[in-house]
Image (cartoon, helix red, strand yellow):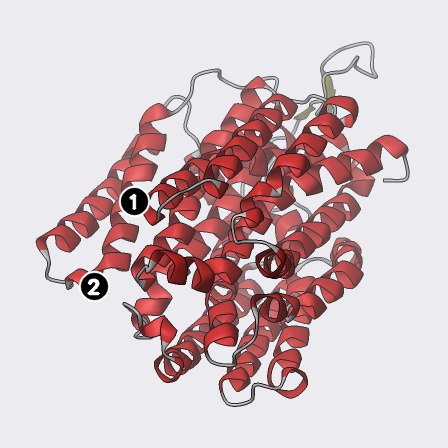
Amino acid sequence: MSSGVGRWIVVATVLGSGMAAIDATVVGIALPSIGRQFHATFGVLQWMVTGYSLTLAALLLVGGTLGDRFGRRRVFSIGIVWFTLASAACALSPDPATLVATRVLQGIGAALLTPGSLAIIQASFDPADRARAIGAWSGLGGVAAAAGPLLGGYLIAAASWRWIFAINLPLGAAVLWLTSRHVPESRDPGADHRIDVPGAIAAVLALGGLVFGLIDGPTLGWSSPLVVSAITTGGVFVVILAVVERRSPSPMLPIAFFTIRQFTVTNAVTLLVYAGLSGMLFLLPTELQVVDHYTPLESGASLLPLTLVMLALSSRSGRLAATIGPRLQMAVGPVVVGAGLLLLARSTSDAAYVSGVLPGVVVLGLGLASTVAPLTATALGAIPVEHSGIASAFNNDVARLGGLLAVAVLPAAAGITGHSYLHSGEFAHGFRTALDVAAACCALGGLLAAAGISNAAALDTGTTVPSEVTYHCGLEATPLASSARAVRP
């Protein structure tokens, strides 16, 4: 981290993953403007968010596998190019259907670049600096996600919602140049070069069926043959996916990883926390604009304190977790996040920013700063470094899956359907209900972490550790020892 190369690696990976993170949050600010221009229902607006999240969640494991096998820098660079071109197509969309389709394509690019960014960090840094580097990556990445609404609000006010996608063109070019100049190539030397195509297809069909049924169920009716068949198809392919992954010679995610308690519990906490967070980020901008009559820029700027808190504390949080262990922060942090969500419900009765919105945003930022860095480091530290691409992809995948389910389920559970998002009274009631559910998810994540996370070393996970461990260099480089295979007790 003290070297120039190390700092440039962090910059390149943060900017790359930040592009995907920003596009996951910035669209929320633009939804009221897009909905009015295209006369779209709330279900169509949900698809503009979930279309992106669907392909991202379904293909993240494939992206991580490709990086481990064919080179993380190479796959990361391909993802940057794909994402940038898809962003240009989003900016030029003439109708809602085209925008949904191009958002789906954008999600594919994000699935290629997102796992590679963290895997590059994991493979490139000295173990002593790895926690600090991951803390910087998660903190700055969280800043990018939180800054998305502010950037989106400014671009909508200054020009048009189309610029929230067009801005990715110069940013993508800069990331590609930095990657080619400063990021070293790394891969898993023992990786199988076969790709789990059946697993990827099953994942897309499983998520697609479930999400379609959950989003369109309130509109078409839960007894509609189309909704019933979609949910049934999704459930069947969930089972098929589990069977395929168990039998595949080159699975997207080795099933044996789930025998490691630290890995399994950390990802369960990730699912719950990111479900609550994503549900809030999806609904809050609309609540501020429709109920409290904020402008797009004002609603985007409302989350700026969250950005500042995470920027100031996330790296320190990562270092603290490396010193005392992750359990305390992962247990307390999600509960604090839930408290911040409950405080945000005040905005429906108090439109003043300082008293109605700011307290919840600050508490939310403190909770996320405590949680994100140790959560990410723990998920990766539970798995050997040569599988860091898969571990990173799965942890990212679980986070996106939590957001995908929240965006699909929370509005329906809260009664937000059709054009109700344009009526302040109906939306305010639904928003409060949605925040109660989101806060409960986060609190449950904290309890789960307290019960299941260990402060022991990464390899002390309840699994049998062999008496001899083979250590591999994470980079393509000349071995330090005279033998390429260094073995020690």
Query: Is 197 left, or right, of 377 in this rendering?
Result: left
481 and 430: which one is in front?
A: 430
Residues 195 and 168: in front is: 168
Q: Quadrant of the C terminus?
A: top right
Quarter containing the N terminus: top right
In the image, residue 415 above or below residue 209:
below
Q: CA distance from mark 2 to mark 1?
A: 17 Å
> Where is 72 relative to 166, above or below?
above
Residue 365's place in the image compared with 184, above or below, is below
What secondary structure is found at the residue carrying circle 2?
A: helix
Q: Quadrant of residue 320?
A: bottom right
Measuring from the top left, give residue 163's x and y in whole percent.
57, 48
Instruction: From the viewer's perspective, tell me whether residue 311 is left or right of residue 75.
Output: right
Tell which of 443 and 256 is nearer to you.
443
Which residue lies under the disc numbered 1? 208
Marker disc for residue 219: 2
Closest to the camera, between mark 2 and mark 1, is: 2
The image quadrant that residue 31 belongs to is bottom left
The picture places residue 127, in percent across and down from the top left corner, at 78, 37
Q: Is residue 470 among what the camera can see? A: yes
Amino acid type, callout 1:
Gly
Q: At x 54% / y 42%, what residue is drawn?
A: 463
What residue is rendered at 40% in x and 81% in y?
Answer: 424
- Label whose residue precedes the other's in the sequence (2 or 1): 1
Question: Mark 1: which secondary structure?
Answer: helix
Amino acid on which the number 2 mark rests in the picture: Thr
Q: Which x, y percent locates residue 290?
A: 46, 76
